[in-house]
Each structure stands twice: as C-alpha cells, then as structure tokens.
Amino acid sequence: MTIHMTGTRDEWLAARLDLLEDEKELTRRSDMLAQRRQELPWVRIEKEYRFDTESGNASLVDLFKGRSQLLVYHFMFGPDYTAGCASCSSIADGFNGVAVHLENHDVAFTAVSRAPLAKLQAFRKRMGWNFDWASSFGSDFNSDFSVWFTEEQQRNGGIGYNYRREAPLAGPPAGQTVQEWQLRGSESPIGQIAAMTGTDIATYTRDRPGLSAFVLEDGAVYHTYSSYARGLDGVWSTYQWLDRAPKGRNEHGIWWRLHDEYGRE
C-alpha cells in the first residue's frame, strides 16, 4: 500500500493549480536570469588558442564555423583518462539533437577536452555521437577557463573552481586508487566515478566540467559567460526529466553509467 498522500481528482487539481503559480514564477525568474546573463560585460580574448579538430588545427575563431556565437562544453576527458567522465557523457548524450538546432540559429557548438584528438574520436565513435569535439591538448584553454588544474594547485589549495577556492587535496584515501577500487569497491561516489575513467581521484578531479559562451564581433572574440558544477544542471536533460518523475531524482550514490555499460556487473 502506498504511503504517499492520495486524494480525489478535484483535490489533485486544486493542488496542481497552486503549484502552477509557483512554476510560472520560476519561469519568469528564469527569464530574468537569462537576461542578466546576456547583460554581463564581454571580455576580449587576447590569447591565440589552438585546437586539434577533425578539420585540422584550428583557432578559437575557427570553432565558430562562420557563426557569431559559440557555446563550448568543457568535457572532462584528460590525457590520462581511458574513457570520458560518466557525468559529462550523460550530459553529452543530449548534444546530438541540440547542436543542429543551435547551428541553424547562428550558434556554433563544440565540446572541448584535453585528451588527444584520436582518443576523443575513438570514444565518440563508441558512444555513437556526432557533435564537434576539439582537443585542447597542450593549450592553456582549459586552465584559463578554470576547468583544469595542476598537481601543485591541487596540493597547495590553488584550485579556484566555480568561483570558489578549494582546500588542498590531502591525497587519495585508502580504497580510492584505481587498483584498490577494482579489488575492494569504491568507498565514495567520487572514487567510483573516477575509476570509470581509469584514473584515481586526484587525476580525475584535476579536470572539471563547465560551459562557456563566446561571441565574435568585428573579427574579435569575446568571452561572455561561464558556468560550472550545479550550474550545468539545466543542460543535463536526464535530470530535467527526473525532476518531473513521481519519485524525483531518487538518488543513492553514483547511479548513472556510460550508456553502453548499463546492465554490466
């Protein structure tokens, strides 16, 4: 027998109409926040970033592909990873259907990761994706946009992510290296998801997820917006669906996987 509150259709409708008022207010608030994002000052990009792409070596301007706007998803896939981050991959499962609409609305889209291009292409093929994915291997791009940090920054508390300074990482606790995880099982969600990429916690968390926006005007590129961590919830379509499901997110640890790994022991 269900322990959730039940009621008549009329009682449901009354509660639903009450909720609708709050949903409408949230929508209006979201529209206001979108306008504030667009009103942020633009910062001109002075550095010459280079990327490896399917079309060859490219500049940041080249990633616009003739459009005036560019959205970049900072995909966690470091050179030492054996697979892309499972969280980023879950988000990326929704990119194929979105990119074609963006690109027909004057907005270019690409994912960018530090891993070499060949590794990115092999993983993209495995996942069945076709969106653009550029390698920033050897570039300052990830560091400059606060989605990659050095071991020294990690040790000394020099990581500034999501506009906040993080405490130093003391080192992986017992059970958190890849080898120990495989033998004993993960002792924390972060250890579990790090092992999915073939790395330990320290290596895994030196790369971070994010989204950055750029505009091209009169031949100059400007950075207009970046968002990180929970700021990416809005582009993680699985969560948008779960938030409307009867039991919500209903999470217990890391439940998601690469989409070709569900059902495996």
Image: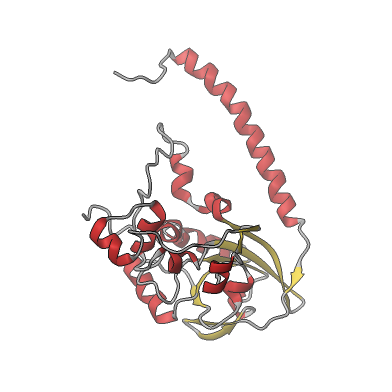
**Any part of residue 109 in sight:** no
Residue placed most toward the observer, 169 or 51? 169
The residue depicted at 58 percent of the width and 27 percent of the height is 20
50 lies left or right of 192 = right
Residue found at the very far left of the displayed protein: 265
Picture coordinates of residue 263, whole percent (x, y): 23, 52
Quadrant in which the N terminus is drawn = top left
Q: Position of residue 58 (x, y in %)?
A: 57, 84
The one of 208 and 244 positioned closer to us in this rendering: 208
* Image x and y of residue 245, in percent: 42, 35
Whether 244 is drawn above or below 64: the answer is: above
Q: Position of residue 110 (x, y in %)?
A: 53, 69
Displayed quadrant of residue 107: bottom right
> How many marks overall?
0
Type of colouring: secondary structure
Would residue 32 be visible to someone looking at this image? yes
Query: Is the residue 119 above or below the residue 197 in the image?
Result: below
Horizontal side of 82 relative to 244 (left or right) equals left
Query: Measuring 49% from the left and 14% from the top, which residue is drawn there?
Result: 11
> In the shown orientation, is residue 47 left or right of residue 62?
right
Name of the residue lying farthest toward the bottom: 57
**Quadrant of the snapshot with the C terminus:** bottom left
Give left or right: position of 182 versus 171. left
Q: Residue at x 46, y 36 (%)?
A: 244
**Front residue (pair 75, 13):** 75
Q: Residue at x 28, y 58 (%)?
A: 261
Considering depth in this image, is 164 or 154 the residue closer to the camera? Answer: 154
